[in-house]
Amino acid sequence: MSDCLNAITHSLIHSFIHSLIYMLNTYKRFWLFHWAEQLQYRANTLMYLLYWLVSPIVYMAVWTAVAQANGSVGGLTTNDFLSYYMVALVVNILCSSIVIHILGPKIEDGTVAAWLLQPVHPVLTYSLMSSITFKALQILAVIPIWAILYVLYRPVMQLELINVLAGGVAVGLGFAILFLHGGGMTFLAFWTTRIWALFNVYIALYSLTSGEFVPLELLPSTLQSIAWVLPYQLTLYFPTQLILGKISLQAALPQFGLQIMWIVIFAALFRWSWRKGLQQYSSVGA
């Protein structure tokens, strides 16, 4: 009996290691492919970079000017705004998801059919690695711009390693939230051609309730209540404040719990909408 159990255990471990190596090799190949692809479309990268830069820089300029004129805004000083938007700029790039831009057009024009013939999940491989390589290139491009902004504004940020590491975990979970959320929203293209209108509504809601436009404590009480219920503040405001040390690790634990909760919810919706969407896609012969 003992020899039988050992043989089964050995077989399971060997199978797991083989599957893990296969998966890592698959993601490695997708990484190399998409990295080369991103380098081919430098104009597109520059356009997206400007998109990520304009909003936070404008918000930072506006709110720091208001704070300088009034001494502070809602208890936030000029340095608070500078620190917040400087960190939020990077967090926003790292957490954002572009899956709707990658997969949405392919569902609408039917070319997603070629992806469905591959022995891998097109979203959890192709779209995921495309998003990650896109982020990597964006971060490399934003580093010198961030350095220039830091030299110009000189924000005082007393960052501690433990907060930065915890913030990194929050950023990873925040990306998972937005990636699964974005995938579920993209799958609506199996039923409707109006996903871009819905996406614009999402962008407006995200800007208001994530902390992108203004730190949440400055929102009207009603909007604050809505923001705390929705998951979007967990993908920008929470990681940013955690990195800056504005939220203690003890106070951050419930927020981490909420991040995991939303990941589970969006993962379930992601799986359900993908399966149902494929049935719909097949039924109309797209």
Image (tube, rainbow, N blue to C red):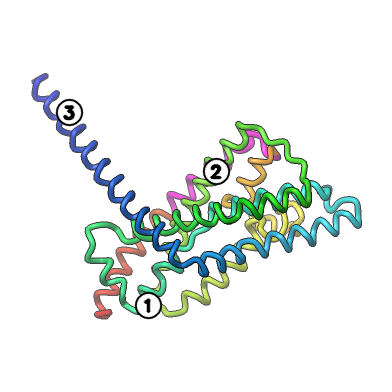
How far apart are labels 1 and 2 at the CA level? 33 Å
Dot label at residue 170: 2
Residue located at (50% from left, 55% from top): 137
Residue located at (21% from left, 39% from top): 18
- The residue carrying mark 1 is 108
Nearer the N terminus, badge 1 or badge 2? 1
Q: Residues within 10 Å of mark 2 (few under 14, many from 20)?
A: many
State the residue in front, 71 or 154. 154
Q: Position of residue 271 (x, y in %)?
A: 34, 58
Residue located at (47% from left, 58% from top): 134
Q: Does the CB distance between marks 2 and 3 fall below 8 Å? A: no
Is label 3 in a helix, a strand or a loop?
helix
248 to the left or right of 181:
right
Assess whether residue 247 is covered by the magenta stretch. yes
* Residue type indicated by callout 3: Thr
Residue 122 is drawn in which quadrant? bottom left
Q: Main secondary structure of the magenta part?
A: helix
Nearer the N terminus, badge 1 or badge 3? 3
Q: Residues within 10 Å of mark 1 (few under 14, many from 20)?
A: some
Q: Does residue 268 lie above or below 164 as drawn?
A: below
Q: Does the CB distance between marks 1 and 2 fall below 8 Å? A: no
Numbered range of the magenta stretch: 246-265
Nearer the N terminus, badge 2 or badge 3? 3
Q: Position of residue 155 (x, y in %)?
A: 77, 45
Q: Does residue 283 lie above or below 5 as drawn?
A: below
Q: Does residue 16 lie above or below 25 as drawn?
A: above
Residue located at (29% from left, 74% from top): 281
Residue 229 appears in view: no
